[in-house]
Every structure is written in structure tokens, then in C-alpha cells.
């Protein structure tokens, strides 16, 4: 049993009723257990964040920046433990777990830099009218609740924690019950750095704990990353209290491949977009739109590339793709395989769970998938790629945009003018051109349509935790 809640600067045992099993998905077996936080522990965490707020928001920005740099440094010092834990609990291949850690480190470093610039952001505002002066002050939103999923635990939490702390907010973080140990590192680092008690609180638990946090009337803002169904509940609780909410939700993103592409290069980008993290990415490019002129050459090579991926236990084998992270996710993906069979989809690769211990599925490719297929329209969150052919640029844009989601897209073309034009026409928050999904902390993250509200990363990620105050003075 692990003690895993960090409240008001203390590690405490959960007093909730749920026992959470922490699993190794490659074996399908638990390796740790913890008790969820109770509703009253969520209250305590929010109260701790509230009482820490006045002092924290009054610290000078350079002091907050020093703490953020400390987080970056200490994450690096815990590299091996954190990489191994992600491999063990998420099933991530080592190189992916390393990249996640580096992303989290870069995020804390970047927001330390933005925090240092904060004083210069308070400005005098020139007024057309005489007799008055006006100035702006950027203030922290206040106490924020952060609720995150399991697929990139270190990263998703860093994208929220670092800008929130930089802005001068105090926080209550609720990690996913699937990966409740990884973000404990943030509490341990807070301890090691002497972060004032209550600035960062961590409560673990399932839906009940998340709901207790999102319904809490002691918060000034909520930032949620997760599924659309829970996101809409979180939005309802925010609307009940008329408070701001950032939502980073699901996706069903397109990768558009024009026939002037190098086939092997395009295959590499397509495979990365669907097999990274075993396809458990909000940004998985799970809808392949391939132009008629290249489809017959590309699809067999794509099939071979998917079949050649080394799928296995990242702790004991050299792998390209690990298991799905939870049994629930494995069952969900298997149910889509069954739907595909019922719909009579043409399967070029995979289409089944692997016959071995653990929660493994094969990398999967369906072709000529009808536009109304559930596999074409719904987020599966696994390594399941659906392909359709297109003739013209206009058709590709229309089909890519024909989705209730709008998170990301990838465009592959040797004609860069066209690629840029198509990127501009896609109704999404982030587009890659001729690239794997490289995410840089200076750029933005977030979606349009059903993929969410607001942006993380870059200066927009910091603005999400700030409010603007104007001070207008009459000179008369
Ligand atoms: P989820 O919505 O089931 O859970 C997310 C978090 O919400 C967890 O911490 C969970 O315990 C909590 N929760 C559950 N019920 C709650 C409730 N009633 N009230 C408050 N909190 C509650 O999502 P998941 O399965 O953990 O993650 C997968 C989803 O996350 C996918 O849809 C994926 O696309 C999305 N996601 C989006 C992004 C993005 O940046 N847009 C990034 C990663 C994941």
C-alpha cells in the first residue's frame, strides 16, 4: 500500500473508499495499491491551496522561476526511476518514456523563463482621452484544480503545473487512477525544493475524487485533460459556478498524404502517428487520407511496416510498441475490432488482440473505410488506423474537416505551397507538415470543435492561468 496524497506539504494516506490497483499492462498484473483520497481530503487540499495563495502570488516572479528551474533539474535527477516507472505502469517503450521526461523538463524550464519576464508584461496603456492614465497588471487566476488522464502523465501534468505555478496560482492536481504513482514525483520535488506548503497539492482517486474536485466551490479555475464524456461533466460543474475552464479533449485526426510524397518517408510519418504510445494519443492521426495516385504503392508498404513493428514488454524486450495501458482500454479497442468485423471492413493488418499475457493488440489497418463507419468517426485510442482514398485537394480538406473533433492534422506533400495552403484550411489546433508529431513547448496545444476549449503551451498556456487587471487613474 502506497501513501500517495500530498496535502498542505504532508504525505498522507487515502481515507476514501476506493482501493486503486496500479498495474503493469505488459503482464496484466498489479504491482502496487493505494487508497483513494476521500471527499474531505479533497476539501483539505483545496483549503491548503487557498491559504497558500496570498503568499505565493506575492512572491517575486524570479523566485517562482527559481522553483520551476528546480523542478526541471530534479526531474532530470530522477530520470532512471521515472523512465522505468512509465515503462512499467504505462507500457511505454524506453525511448518514448525518455522523450516524455525531456518534454516535462523542457516545460518547467520554459515557464521559468516566462516567469522571469512577467514584471515587464505589466504595462502602461496609452489612452486617446486626456486626463487619465491606465496600466495593466497580470494576476494569477487563483486556486486551480488540474485533472489529468493517464496516457502522458508526466507531460500533461507539467503542461498545467508549470504555467500555473509561474503565474502565481496554487494548485490541486488529480492524476489518473490508472497512473497514480508517476506524478508523485512532483510532490517529492516540491518537498525537496522547500516549495511552500499548500502551493502544490496532489490527490489521487477515481471519478468520485475527480468530481469532488471539479464540483468544489473553493476553486477559481479548472483545467481538465481527458475524454469528451468526462469533459462535458467538468464543464457542467464549471458552468454551475460560472468559473473558467480549460478543456483538452479527444481527437480523430487526419493525416493527408498527397501523391507527390516519397512513399517510404510517408509510411514512417503515418506509422509514428498511429503507433506512438500504442495509439493512445489524443493526437493520433487515425484517419489516413491517401491520394489515388500513391495509394496502391503506399498501402502494401504501410501494411508491412505495421506488421514489422516489434510489439512487446518494454521492460524485457527491445520494442517499438508496448501494450495498451489498461485492461479497460484493451477491452475497448477489442470491441472496435468486433465492430469492424460486423461492419465488414477490409483489414490489411492486425485487427485482433495478441495471444499472450498482458494487454497487447496488433497494429491495425483498415482500408476503404466508409465515412459513416464508427471506426472512421469515433476516437478509438489504440493503434487502429483507418484509410480512405481521395482524388483532389478540395476533397481531402473536406473529408479531413468532416469530424466533430479538431485537434491536430498532418499534411505530407513535396509541394510546400500546397501543404501550407492545406494546413491553413484544416479546422484543427495544430498541423504538422512532413513531420512526425514533434511538439515544442514554445508552440501551442489544444483543439477546435469537440477537441476542447483553450490552449496549453507557449505564452497561451501561461495566459490560461492569468487574469488581466486594468488600473485607470484620473489625473485631475
Ligand atoms: P477520462 O476522461 O476517463 O479521465 C480523465 C481524468 O478525469 C482522470 O483523472 C479521471 O479520474 C477523471 N475523472 C473521471 N470521472 C470524472 C468526473 N466525473 N469528474 C471529474 N473527473 C473525473 O480520460 P482518460 O481515459 O484518462 O484519458 C483518455 C482521454 O483523454 C482521451 O479521450 C484522450 O483523447 C484525452 N486526452 C486529451 C489530450 C489533449 O491534450 N487534448 C491529451 C491526453 C488525453
Image (tube, rainbow, N blue to C red):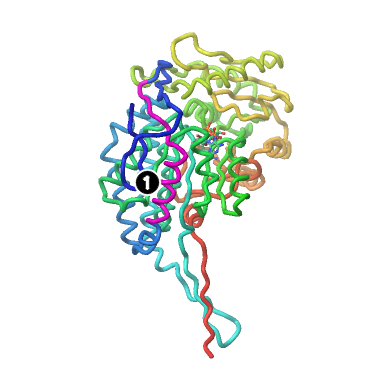
Q: Is residue 410 left or right of residue 88?
A: right
Front one among 314 and 295: 314
- Cβ of mark 1 under 8 A from ligand 1: no
Residue 46 falls within the magenta-colored stretch: yes
Q: How many marks?
A: 1
On whether residue 128 falls in the magenta region, the answer is: no
- Compared to 176, does 458 lie above or below? below
In the rendered image, the quadrant that contains the C terminus is: bottom right
Foreground residue, 308 or 135? 135
Give the main secondary structure, helix, strand or loop, of the magenta stretch: helix
Q: Give the class, few, some or many, for how many residues have Cα within 10 Å of label 1's Cα (few <14, many ≥20).
A: many
Q: Is residue 283 visible?
A: no
Element on which disc 1 rests = helix
* Quarter of the N terminus within the rendering: top left
Q: Position of residue 100 (x, y in %)?
A: 40, 36
* Horizontal side of residue 62 vs 174, given as left or right: left
**Which residue occupies 50% across, 57% down?**
463
The residue carrying mark 1 is 106
Place of residue 378 in the rendered image (x, y in percent of width and height, measured from the top left): 65, 29
Query: Can residue 437 be seen?
Result: yes
Residue 37 position within the rendered picture, expressed as x and y whole percent measured from the top left: 42, 36
For this view, does 56 lie left or right of residue 380? Answer: left
Residue at 71% x, 16% y is: 343
Q: Nearer the viewer, residue 387 or 339?
A: 339
Q: Position of residue 219 (x, y in %)?
A: 50, 52
Query: Which stretch is magenta?
Result: 31-52
The residue closer to the viewer here, 154 or 22, is 22
357 shown above or below 319: above
Amino acid at each position: 500500500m502506497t501513501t500517495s496524497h500530498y496535502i498542505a506539504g504532508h504525505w498522507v494516506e487515502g481515507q476514501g473508499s476506493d482501493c486503486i490497483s496500479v498495474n503493469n499492462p505488459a503482464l496484466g498484473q498489479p504491482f502496487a495499491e493505494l487508497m483513494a483520497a476521500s471527499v474531505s481530503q479533497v476539501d483539505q487540499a483545496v483549503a491548503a491551496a487557498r491559504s497558500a495563495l496570498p503568499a505565493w502570488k506575492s512572491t517575486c516572479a524570479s523566485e517562482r522561476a527559481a522553483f520551476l528551474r528546480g523542478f526541471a533539474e530534479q526531474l532530470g535527477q530522477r530520470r532512471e526511476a521515472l523512465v522505468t516507472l512509465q515503462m512499467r505502469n504505462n507500457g511505454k517503450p524506453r525511448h518514448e518514456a525518455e522523450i516524455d521526461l525531456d518534454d516535462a523538463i523542457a516545460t518547467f524550464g520554459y515557464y521559468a523563463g516566462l516567469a522571469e519576464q512577467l514584471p515587464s508584461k505589466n504595462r502602461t496603456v496609452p489612452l486617446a482621452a486626456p486626463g487619465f492614465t491606465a496600466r495593466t497588471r497580470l494576476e494569477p487566476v487563483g486556486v486551480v484544480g488540474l485533472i489529468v488522464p493517464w496516457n502522458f502523465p508526466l507531460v500533461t501534468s507539467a503542461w498545467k503545473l508549470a504555467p500555473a505555478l509561474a503565474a502565481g496560482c496554487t494548485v490541486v492536481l488529480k492524476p489518473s487512477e490508472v497512473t497514480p504513482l508517476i506524478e508523485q514525483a512532483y510532490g517529492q520535488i516540491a518537498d525537496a525544493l522547500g516549495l511552500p506548503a499548500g502551493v502544490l497539492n496532489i490527490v489521487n482517486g477515481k471519478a468520485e475524487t475527480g468530481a469532488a474536485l471539479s464540483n468544489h466551490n473553493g476553486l477559481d479555475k479548472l483545467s481538465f485533460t481527458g475524454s469528451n464524456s468526462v469533459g462535458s461533466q467538468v464543464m457542467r460543474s464549471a458552468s454551475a459556478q460560472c468559473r473558467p475552464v480549460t478543456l483538452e479533449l479527444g481527437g480523430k485526426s487526419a493525416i493527408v498524404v498527397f501523391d507527390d510524397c516519397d512513399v517510404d518517408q510517408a509510411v514512417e510519418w503515418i506509422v509514428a502517428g498511429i503507433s506512438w504510445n500504442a495509439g493512445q494519443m489524443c493526437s493520433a492521426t487515425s484517419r489516413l487520407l491517401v491520394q489515388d495516385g500513391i495509394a496502391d504503392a503506399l498501402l502494401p508498404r504501410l501494411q508491412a511496416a505495421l506488421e514489422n513493428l516489434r510489439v512487446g514488454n518494454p521492460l524485457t524486450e527491445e520494442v517499438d510498441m508496448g501494450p495498451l495501458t489498461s485492461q479497460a482500454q484493451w477491452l475497448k479497442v477489442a470491441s472496435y475490432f468486433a465492430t469492424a468485423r460486423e461492419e465488414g471492413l477490409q483489414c490489411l493488418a492486425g485487427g485482433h488482440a495478441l495471444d499472450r499475457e498482458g494487454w497487447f493488440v496488433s497494429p491495425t489497418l483498415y482500408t476503404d473505410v466508409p465515412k459513416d463507419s464508427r471506426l472512421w468517426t469515433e476516437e478509438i485510442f489504440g493503434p487502429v488506423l483507418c484509410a480512405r482514398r481521395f482524388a483532389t485537394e478540395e476533397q481531402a480538406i473536406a473529408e479531413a474537416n468532416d469530424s466533430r473533433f479538431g485537434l491536430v492534422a498532418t499534411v505530407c506533400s513535396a509541394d510546400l505551397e500546397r501543404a501550407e495552403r492545406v494546413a491553413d484550411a484544416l479546422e484543427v489546433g495544430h498541423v504538422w507538415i512532413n513531420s512526425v508529431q514533434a511538439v515544442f513547448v514554445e508552440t501551442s496545444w489544444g483543439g477546435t470543435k469537440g477537441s476542447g476549449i483553450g490552449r496549453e503551451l507557449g505564452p497561451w498556456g501561461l495566459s490560461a492561468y492569468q487574469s488581466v487587471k486594468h488600473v485607470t487613474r484620473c489625473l485631475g
